[in-house]
Image (tube, rainbow, N blue to C red):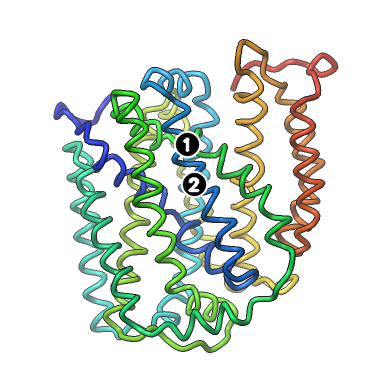
């Protein structure tokens, strides 16, 4: 995987830990906790945060050397390409969707909003220069410090909106039924993230890899998703059309919005940069372009879609994107990577698609109809399918 310039990138595990934290602060980590707090209270947040942090950190321990990471990418370039492509499309959908209500949620005056816009434009320019000079870890460290500052500021302000949100969450067994699916997704998805492999390949020793990933997720990323809980109330209120107490001051709201937009830009930037290093990426550019444009257009008009089962049309589409990370991508890693360890043959792709097709209606009931108990048989189908020997199914080579 070639570097974009002749400058030698840093090997510092602290800087690469910041890079990992910022590249993983997605439209999932900056938004899904608000939905989980609304639906399940703190139990929902914990079943999201715990496997997310630990699963991502574990990659730095499982891939012991940079060679392990390089071989993984060489063996699974198509799956990794699709992971980044769907991630980029997801981000385009999300940013256009939330643009319909986020200013209402944060209630930022136009004069303050203009300052936010100026900072965001400056960050776009700076991030482009940082990419060319191999300085993205340093930029990530700066962005991380800013976001941590915003987090600290939120604790100096009242949080009545969050109190209303959490106190109104129903007390159910849904977190218990959903926890296995969360573990499945967050334990396996990181191995298809090309930005994680980029970081692992720069952290040139086993100890640096372990330190960088542990710091990145336990030390740095965990506060980022905690920050999401600090504005969850106003996001959930705007999404549902209810009226919650606004963020304490316009400046704090501006800081939160700047955090969201700059973290979004960072994630999109690094995925666009890394996806081009994959074999065949040049020929897939038209596919990526169409996918991103189509997702952005859908996001822009998602607010007009009809509601279902108490979910807005936009949230249904958001959860549909989430199914890639909760079912499709982790199933690939389970069938094609985990089951192929120690010299064994990977389970056939045909069987993987059959298992996912059988499990999909149950995942729909679990996540869209919010009958979480259906996730248990859905997970059972996917996992049991991986252990059925492929002798009775046509073998398909690695993708």
- Where does residue 258 sit, x and y in percent of width and height? 30, 67
- Within the image, what quadrant is residue 174 found in? bottom right
Q: Which residue is mark 2?
A: 87
In the rendering, at what x and y percent does residue 376 appear?
A: 78, 49
Q: What residue is disc 1 on?
A: 58
Nearest the viewer among 296 and 104 is: 104
Q: Nearer the viewer, mark 1 or mark 2?
A: 1
Q: Residue at x 29, y 62 (%)?
A: 148
Q: Is residue 302 above or below residue 287?
A: below
Pointer 1 or 2: first along the chain: 1
Quarter of image, res 135: top left
Q: Quadrant of the C terminus?
A: top right
Q: Is residue 314 left or right of residue 275?
A: right
In three-dimensional space, the C-alpha distance between marks 1 and 2, rounded to whole angstroms, equals 21 Å
Placement of 125 over or under 396, stated as above or below:
below
Query: Seen in the image, is 236 located left or right of residue 263?
Result: right
Q: Tag 2's secondary structure? A: helix
- x%, y% of residue 165? 56, 80
């Amino acid at each position: 995987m070639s570097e974009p310039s002749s400058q030698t990138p840093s090997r510092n595990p602290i800087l690469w830990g910041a890079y990992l934290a910022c590249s993983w602060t997605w439209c999932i980590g900056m938004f899904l906790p608000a939905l989980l707090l609304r639906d399940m209270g703190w139990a929902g947040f914990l079943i999201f945060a715990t496997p997310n942090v630990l699963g991502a950190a574990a990659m730095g321990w499982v891939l012991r050397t940079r060679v392990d990471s390089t071989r993984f990418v060489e063996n699974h370039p198509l799956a990794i390409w699709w992971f980044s492509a769907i991630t980029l499309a997801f981000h385009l959908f999300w940013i256009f969707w939330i643009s319909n209500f986020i200013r209402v949620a944060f209630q930022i005056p136009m004069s303050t909003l203009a300052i936010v816009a100026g900072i965001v434009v400056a960050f776009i320019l700076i991030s482009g220069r940082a990419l060319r000079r191999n300085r993205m870890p340093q930029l990530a460290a700066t962005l991380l410090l800013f976001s941590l500052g915003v987090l600290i500021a939120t604790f100096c302000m009242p949080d009545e909106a969050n109190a209303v949100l959490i106190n109104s969450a129903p007390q159910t067994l849904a977190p218990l039924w959903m926890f296995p699916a969360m573990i499945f997704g967050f334990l396996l998805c990181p191995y298809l993230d090309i930005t994680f492999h980029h970081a692992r390949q720069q952290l040139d020793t086993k100890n640096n890899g372990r330190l960088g990933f542990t710091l990145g997720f336990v030390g740095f990323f965990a506060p980022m998703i905690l920050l999401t809980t600090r504005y969850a109330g106003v996001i959930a209120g705007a999404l549902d059309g209810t009226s919650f107490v606004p963020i304490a001051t316009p400046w704090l709201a501006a800081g939160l919005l700047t955090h969201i937009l700059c973290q979004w830009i960072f994630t999109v930037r690094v995925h666009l940069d890394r996806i081009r290093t994959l074999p065949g990426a040049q020929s897939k550019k038209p596919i990526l372009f169409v996918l991103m444009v189509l997702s952005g257009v859908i996001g822009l008009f998602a607010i007009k879609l009809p509601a279902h089962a108490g979910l807005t049309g936009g949230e249904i589409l958001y959860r549909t994107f989430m199914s890639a990370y909760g079912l499709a991508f982790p199933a690939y890693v389970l069938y094609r990577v985990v089951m192929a360890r120690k010299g064994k043959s990977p389970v056939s792709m045909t069987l993987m698609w059959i298992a996912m097709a059988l499990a999909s209606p149950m995942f729909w009931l679990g996540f869209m109809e919010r009958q979480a108990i259906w996730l248990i048989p859905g997970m059972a189908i996917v996992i049991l399918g991986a252990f059925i020997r492929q002798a009775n199914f046509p073998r398909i080579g690695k993708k």
